[in-house]
């Protein structure tokens, strides 16, 4: 059950904000967010657990709506280094992970 | 702390040939994942290990793919015989387990090209 991400791509200017969404058709245990730069491995950004707990980088924020089975990643005051492809990973039970197709973010000067 | 190590980084083979990928997870990480990533797509889970036990291999094409994690540390993923459609990046990831154990640390991947 692959989660659905939107938008597929977004282009920003430095300093602008963006929101990336992730939705599932099944009840979620947790949502993960990763960023992958071209030719590199995905890097962990944040995990949001059912019940409201979360762990991640201080400059990254996200929300998890358990009832709607949706999560959103908020990128504020974007920097050039934010460019990359963002993947959400959804867990339906402990460690059963499925990734979305990704959202390509481009930040321009 | 050393990260997840994978080798080789690149592999080019003829179709119908066998190929093997190796992964050494972060020390102490009990959970190990193998993913396949096609260009422009997210990682697709092939198999997940908890220590030496394969606990999720439902998406592993067992007619040609096999994996093992002897002693619950490093792991090998094999394809025999390889097909043109197997060209992709094969990612290995590990996780420490526990309350926050689902955070995954990815290796650099092996880019496979089947000619």
Image (spheres, coloured by chain):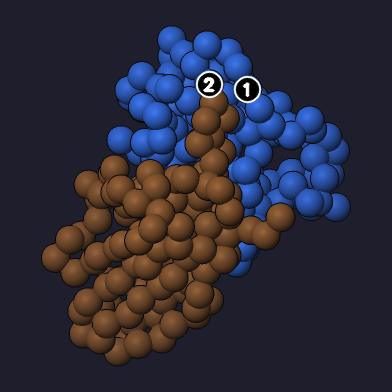
Chain colours: A blue, B brown
Q: Position of residue B97 (x, y in %)?
A: 50, 36
Q: Nearer the viewer, residue B23 or A15?
A: B23
Q: Where is residue A97 in the image (x, y as percent from the top left)?
A: 40, 38
Q: Outermost residue toward the left? A: B63
Mark 2 vs mark 1: which is more N-terminal? 2
Q: Is residue A28 left or right of residue B85?
A: right
Chain of the residue where label 1 is placed in the rendered structure: A
Q: Position of residue A63 (x, y in %)?
A: 61, 20
* Element class at badge 2: strand
Q: Which of B41 and B5 is in front in this view?
A: B5
- Is there any visible trace of residue B110 in the rendered image? yes
Q: Mark 2 points at which residue?
A: A49
Q: Does mark 1 fall on the same chain as mark 2? A: yes
* Element class at badge 1: strand
Q: How crowded is mark 2: few (under 14 residues within 10 Å), some or many (20 or more)?
A: some
Q: Mark 1 points at which residue?
A: A54
Q: Do the residues labelled 2 and 1 touch (CB within 8 Å)?
A: yes
Total marks drawn?
Answer: 2
- Is there any visible trace of residue B34 in the rendered image? no
Q: Nearer the viewer, residue B96 or A12?
A: B96
Write the residue at 62% across / 63% down: A40
Write the residue at 37% across / 67% down: B76
Label 2 and label 1: CA atoms lie apart by 6 Å
Q: Where is residue B50 in the image (x, y as percent from the top left)?
A: 38, 44
Quarter of the view holding residue B99? top right
Please say if A79 is above or below B60: above
Q: Residues within 10 Å of mark 1 (few under 14, many from 20)?
A: some
Write the residue at 83% across / 34% down: A77
Please say if A8 is above or below A70: below
Q: Is residue B26 left or right of residue B62?
A: right
């Amino acid at each position: 059950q692959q989660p659905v991400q939107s938008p597929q791509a977004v282009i920003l200017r430095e300093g602008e904000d963006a929101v990336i969404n992730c939705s599932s058709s099944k009840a979620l245990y947790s949502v993960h967010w990763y960023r992958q730069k071209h030719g590199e491995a995905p890097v962990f950004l944040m995990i949001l657990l059912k019940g409201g707990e979360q762990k991640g980088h201080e400059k990254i924020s996200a929300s998890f709506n358990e009832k709607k089975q949706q999560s959103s990643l908020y990128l504020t005051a974007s920097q050039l280094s934010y460019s990359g492809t963002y993947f959400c990973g959804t867990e339906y039970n402990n460690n059963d992970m499925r990734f979305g197709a990704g959202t390509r973010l481009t930040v321009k000067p | 702390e050393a990260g997840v190590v994978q080798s080789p980084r690149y592999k080019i083979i003829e179709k119908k040939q066998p190929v093997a990928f190796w992964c050494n997870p972060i020390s102490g990480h009990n959970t190990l994942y193998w993913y396949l990533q096609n260009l422009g797509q997210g990682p697709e889970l092939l198999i997940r290990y908890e220590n030496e036990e394969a606990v999720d291999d439902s998406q592993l094409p067992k007619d040609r793919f096999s994996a093992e994690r002897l002693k619950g540390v490093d792991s090998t993923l094999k394809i025999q015989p390889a097909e043109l459609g197997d060209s992709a990046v094969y990612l290995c990831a590990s996780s420490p387990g526990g309350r926050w154990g689902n955070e995954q640390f990815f290796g650099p991947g092996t880019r496979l090209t089947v000619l």
